[in-house]
Image (tube, rainbow, N blue to C red):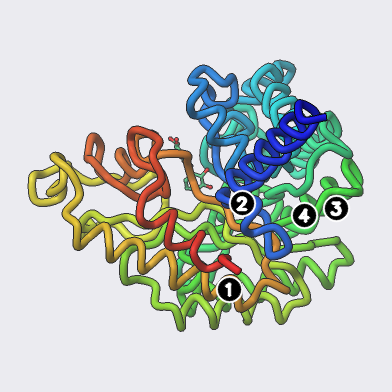
Amino acid sequence: MKLNRIVLLSAMLVTALANTTFAQSLRSAYDGAFLIGTALSTNQILEKDPVQAALVAKEFNALTAENDMKSSLLHPEEDVYKWEIADALYALAEKTNSKVHGHTLIWHSQLSRFFREKKTKEDMIAAMTKHINAVAGRYAGRTFSWDVVNEAVEGDGSLRKSVFLEVLGEDYLALAFKLAAAADPKAELYYNDYSMTGVEKREGVIRMVKKIQESGAKIDGIGMQGHWGLESPTLEEIETSILAYAALGVKVSITELDIDVLPNPRNVSGADISQSAQNTAALNPYVNGLPDEIKAAQAKRYKDIFALFLKHKSIISRVTVWGVNDGNSWKNNFPARGRTNYPLLFDRENKPKEAYYSILELRKK
Ligand code: XIL
C-alpha cells in the first residue's frame, strides 16, 4: 500500500516536472497564438548535433530548410533531383510533430541553371510546371505551407526583372500559384519577401497580390521575412504593413526573423543576397561578446515585436526565426563575411538568451 503510494506520487512528480519543462518552451507557450518556426541547416536537418536536435524538437513546431529546398539544391539539373535532405526534413517534422514550410518554389536566387536557359514562353512554362509538379507534388499533403514565389518585387514597388519576368511577363506569378495549388491543393500558398515594411515596396506587393487574386489563383498568405535591426523598421511600420497585407484577405507570417545587432554597411539595405560589403573592425565590434546593454536592447526589441504579433494573432499564422543559434546565423556572413553577430534567440552554446526569456515572458499566465 505504502509502496504503491510512493510509486504514484513519484509518477505525479515526474509528470509535473515534465509539464513544467514543457511549459518552458516557445512552441508550447505560443500554442493557440501562432506557430513558432526555425530554419535548419543541412546538419541540423540530419540531427548531427544532438543538443541542437533536442532544442529544435523542444522549442519549435514549424521547420524550414534554410537552403536545401531551393531549386539549385533540390533540382540542380533538368532531370536531376536531390531529395535526400528534404526527405529528412519531412521525416524530422513528422517525428517531432512539427509543420514543414516549403522554401521556395520560384526564386531568382539560388536558382537552377536550366531555368536561365529557357528563352521562349513555352519552354519556361514547361520548366516551371515540371519543377513545381515534382517538388510540391512529392510532398503533397505533408507540406503545411509553401513560399510559392520569393522576392519578386523591388524596393520601388516594380516587379523584379528576373528570368521569369523577362520570359513570361507578370503572368508567371499567377501561373506559379496555380501550379502549386494543383500540385498540392491542401498546402497554404504564400508570397514571401524582405523589406516588406517599405512604403513603395508594400504598395507594389499589394498591387501584385491583387492581380494574382484577380486571375483566380489561390494565394493564402504573405510572408514578411523580418531581417530587421534593433530600431528599424519601427513598430508602427511593422504594424501598418501587417494590417495592409491582411486587408487583402490573406494571412500574414513572419518568415525569417532575425534582429541584427551590428552596424549596417552603408551600401546595403534589406536582404538581397547578391549584395555584399567589406568586413572591417568598425563593422564588427562585438567579436569578444555582446555588451549587456545591447543584450537588453535586443531582448526588449524581441519582446516589443512579439507583443505586436500577439496583438494581431488572429491574422498571423507563423513566426519563424532564421536559424537556431547565433553561431549558425547567416547574419555572420551577410552582408559582410566573417563577422560575429547575435541575431537569434539562442547563443553559440545553445543557451537561451535574454531575448528568448523576454518573449516567453509575454505568454506567462
Ligand atoms: C540565405 C541563407 O540563410 C544562407 O545560408 C544562404 O547562403 C543565402 O540565403 N532571403 C531568403 C532566404 O528568402 O532564403 C535567404 O537565406 C536569406 C534572404
**Residue 95: horizontal and vertical position, in percent?**
75, 28
Which badge, 4 or 1, comes first in the chain's sequence? 4
The quarter of the displayed image where residue 348 is located = top left
Real-space CA distance between mark 3 and mark 1, rounded to the nearest whole angstrom: 21 Å
Residue type, mark 2 in image: Ala
Residue type, mark 4 in image: Leu
Q: Secondary structure at mark 4?
A: strand
Q: Which residue is mark 4?
A: 189
Which badge, 4 or 2, comes first in the chain's sequence? 2
For residue 91, above or below residue 364? above
Specify the quadrant that holds the N terminus: top right
The quarter of the displayed image where residue 85 is located = top right
Which badge, 3 or 2, comes first in the chain's sequence? 2
Q: Are marks 3 and 1 in contact (CB under 8 Å)?
A: no
Real-space CA distance between mark 4 and mark 3, rounded to the nearest whole angstrom: 10 Å
Give the tally of numbered discs.
4
Real-space CA distance between mark 4 and mark 2, rounded to the nearest whole angstrom: 31 Å
Mark 3 or 2, closer to the camera:
2
Real-space CA distance between mark 1 and mark 2, rounded to the nearest whole angstrom: 41 Å
Residue type, mark 3 in image: Lys
Q: Which residue is mark 1?
A: 204
Asked if residue 329 shows in the view, the reply is: no
Q: Are marks 4 and 3 in contact (CB under 8 Å)?
A: no
Q: Which residue is mark 3?
A: 178
Q: Secondary structure at mark 2?
A: helix
Asked if residue 244 shows in the view, the reply is: yes
Specify the quadrant that holds the C terminus: bottom right
Which badge, 4 or 3, comes first in the chain's sequence? 3
Residue type, mark 1 in image: Gly
